Image (cartoon, helix red, strand yellow):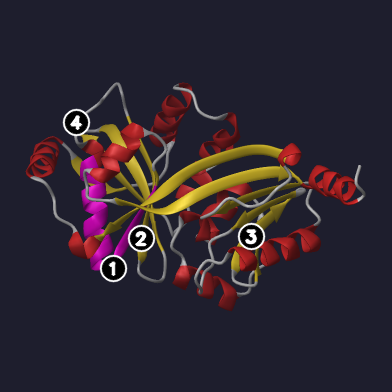
Amino acid sequence: MLSASERHYVLQRAYIPEHLVHYFTSISGAEPCLIADYLCYFSEGKLSFIGYPLGREFEMAALSQALNEAVEKFEPEQVGVISPRSIDVEPLAILKKESDCYYLLDLEKLKLSKKLRSTLKSAYKRLEVKKGEFGEEHFALVEEFLRRGIDESKQGVFEKLESYASRGEALLLEARQKRELVAFSIFDFSHGEFAFYMFNFISRKNYVPGASDLLLGEFIREAKERGKRYLNLGLGINSGVARFKEKWGAKRWLKYEFCSYDCELANMVASYRRMGI
């Protein structure tokens, strides 16, 4: 559990979405905890460890020490770690691994291409953008997205999206053509220099080119008004998503390495190896 002062400390220094405690707890139901300078979440035997330090440079030795402390404290059955570098885990115990990269947009250096300006101008003529509240129409777009096929392990995040989107910290912007919902995005903010591009959903039935760009453009304006310097656009995910972020001038930034493993099996195999078995 985090104290009020710890929550403020985390939000002041947050630079990746997983540092946003209100977001992670909404979609996971886990309890947050601060170990040294690392944030982690624990629920029902599962430990989610965020290996991006809040107030210091990344060091593998410091991460390993904090991770070991968290495992000793919570005694989890399963551990999931995200970090800028791969952690050293017994291969036989690994359940899943992923690699990606966070994209960063420096708002002070933002310069739109002629083509992007034209896209925004065209979308602006056809659509109205405003702040919204998550409802049945938004859930329908999420369901449409899920029907396209998604990693089963990530479905829970989207199924609990309403809980997160309904919180006061999140900003939901929607694009409508007349009364029809065309697209919506969810954004968020740290208490420091960072703003976050969290989710984007578009309608295939009511598709309007440039809708997602228009939403992002409006969010950038909002972020600047709030004095934000950087926009974390999230992970690359795939080539299409990466191209969308790159056309706005976002650069590949922090490496993302995810590893989940069976803690009991890892400890057992390590014990056998120490005994020479």
Residue type at mark 1 is Arg
Residue type at mark 2 is Ala
- Residue at numbered disc 4: 209
SS under mark 3: strand
SS under mark 4: loop
- Residue at numbered disc 2: 195
For the point 71% across and 43% down, which residue is it?
Answer: 261
Q: Quadrant of the C terminus?
A: top right
- Dot 4 crowding, Cα within 10 Å, few <14, some 14–19, many 20+: some
Residue type at mark 3 is Cys
Q: Nearer the viewer, residue 130 or 91?
A: 91
Q: Quadrant of residue 196?
A: bottom left
- Residue at numbered disc 1: 226
Front disc: 2 or 3: 3
- Residue at numbered disc 3: 40
Q: Earlier in the sequence, mark 2 or mark 3?
A: 3
